[in-house]
Image (cartoon, coloured by chain):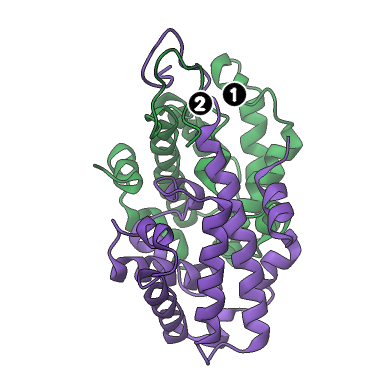
Chain colours: A green, B purple
Amino acid sequence: MQTLQEKASQWSGVDTADAFAIDDTSLFQKLGLQTFINLSTNFYTRVYDDEEEEWFRSIFSNSKKEEAIQNQYEFFVQRMGGPPLYSQRKGHPALIARHRPFPVTHQAAERWLYHMEKALESTPDIDADSRVKMMNFFRHTAFFLVAGDELKTQKQQIPCKHGASKPAES
Amino acid sequence: MQTLQEKASQWSGVDTADAFAIDDTSLFQKLGLQTFINLSTNFYTRVYDDEEEEWFRSIFSNSKKEEAIQNQYEFFVQRMGGPPLYSQRKGHPALIARHRPFPVTHQAAERWLYHMEKALESTPDIDADSRVKMMNFFRHTAFFLVAGDELKTQKQQIPCKHGASKPAES
């Protein structure tokens, strides 16, 4: 059976070493907090205005834009060499579990990455080398979450039987 | 509805600020790699020899001890200020998703913490202040995983009906 990260690498085309090249240097020290805030603001401004792909925008319809921005930049800052802003406020990232309410399909991953690439391009303080590293991380991570999303539809240990209407309760 | 970290705080009695006080200083710089290796070795030696609580030892029966030790100390090192050993080898920690195969019950969390407290005490290079910080982190995290474990038994979006034998495939 393929592991989560094997699926992530296969589907994204980005191996683990390239995905985590963000750890070679501190992107937070290089770019600074404001750049991360700008990036996430650019990203979610695009997402919440996505009129071409209404299905994608609708994934975020129950989330507040300002909160989505804060969650994202705090996680990026923490993951890319800065202070652990996300964990201080919300605990473990637990990326897969926290994406459980959302339909993280291959198609959704590609749309997320499309907007992120445009957001990176429209954040001029992010140099080309950082942009490549971040996109590799984002691409691998997006498909890691697609792999995680598929766990939701895996059989529970005790499958539904005899017309039972809920999954295993141990 | 309570969030994962609210449940973790309530059940563990450790709030988020205390749990993540491990981030105040770099425990990795203070303690060094070998201390983390020793801690995880002490921990899993206890776990794999747990003859009082056979049900707990059996949770680990499909995992190799050496691999369990490496996974654990690499994650601890990465999370406590050291190099990202875990992610370089295995990708995102994704704590809840990676514990999915295991029955992370309240009882299992308490037994895990019992062994970890003993393991910390038998690792003399870990000073009292570090030990308190680490135990707060471990206690909060153990119950964060119990909260995550309960997601497994939540209804899928499309519940089992009409005698269907597997959960939603959308």
Residue A59's label in the rendered image is 1
Q: Quadrant of residue A70?
A: top right
Q: Quadrant of residue B71?
A: bottom left
Q: Nearer the viewer, residue A115 or A95?
A: A95
In the image, which is nearer the foreground, mark 1 or mark 2?
2
Residue pointed to by mark 2: A103
The reply to whether dot 1 and dot 2 touch (C-beta < 8 Å) is yes
Query: Which amino acid type corresponds to the residue marked 1 in the rendered image?
Result: Ile
Q: Residue furthest top?
A: B162
> Disc 1 and disc 2: Cα gap in Å?
8 Å
Q: Position of residue A59 (x, y in %)?
A: 59, 23
Q: Quadrant of the N terminus of chain B?
A: top right
Q: Secondary structure at mark 2?
A: loop
Mark 1 surroundings: few (<14), some (14-19) or many (≥20) residues within 10 A = some
* Residue A152 visible in this rendered orientation of the protein: yes
- Do badges 1 and 2 share one subunit? yes
Q: Position of residue A116 (x, y in %)?
A: 53, 38
Query: Going by the image, does B6 lie left or right of B158?
Result: right
What kind of element bears circle 1? helix
Judging from the image, mark 2 belongs to the subunit labelled A
Horizontally, residue A2 falls left or right of residue A57, namely: left
Q: Residue at x 38, y 13 (%)?
A: B164
Q: Write the residue at 54% across / 81% down.
A: B120
Residue toward you, B161 or A104 = B161
Quarter placement of the C terminus of chain B: top left
- The residue nearer to you, when weighing A25 against B38, is B38
